Amino acid sequence: MSELLDRIDSLQNGLNKLVKQHQAVKRDYKLLLQENEELKAERMQVMDRLEDFDARYSALKAANAMLGSKTFKKETKLKINTLIREIDMCIAHIAD
């Protein structure tokens, strides 16, 4: 009988340890979920800033081209030609 009680005590102790481990894992999981959400928000902010910097960079490139920078002249001419072609296509569609 005492052997049975010892086994029951051992099982209870093991179960208590498992419950404590489970609670610790749940706490860690909640913390990781929170950290994940914070990192997602931070990533979105960084992506927004990157888009802003890209827009600024494009504007600066265009400004340099307008100021006569040889580096960006060809690129600006190509962009203008593309825009003219698009406008011509729009006019052709309207004329039809």
Image: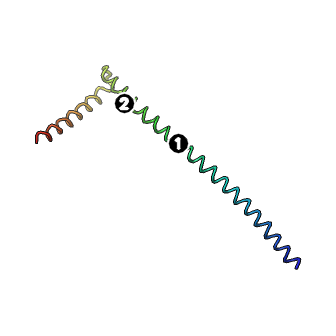
Which residue sits at x=85%, y=73%?
Answer: 6
Which residue sits at x=53%, y=45%?
Answer: 40
Q: Quadrant of the C terminus?
A: top left
Rendered location of residue 38, percent (x, y) = 57, 43
Q: Nearer the viewer, residue 57 or 68?
A: 57
Q: Nearer the viewer, residue 13 or 75?
A: 13
Mark 1 element type: helix
Q: Nearer the viewer, mark 2 or mark 1?
A: 1
Label at residue 58: 2
Label at residue 41: 1
Mark 2 element type: helix
Rendered location of residue 53, percent (x, y) = 43, 32
Q: Is residue 38 left or right of residue 67?
A: right
Rendered location of residue 86, percent (x, y) = 21, 37
Residue 63 falls in which quadrant of the image?
A: top left
Q: Amino acid at mark 2?
A: Ser
Which residue sits at x=11%, y=39%?
Answer: 95
Q: Is residue 3 left or right of residue 28?
A: right
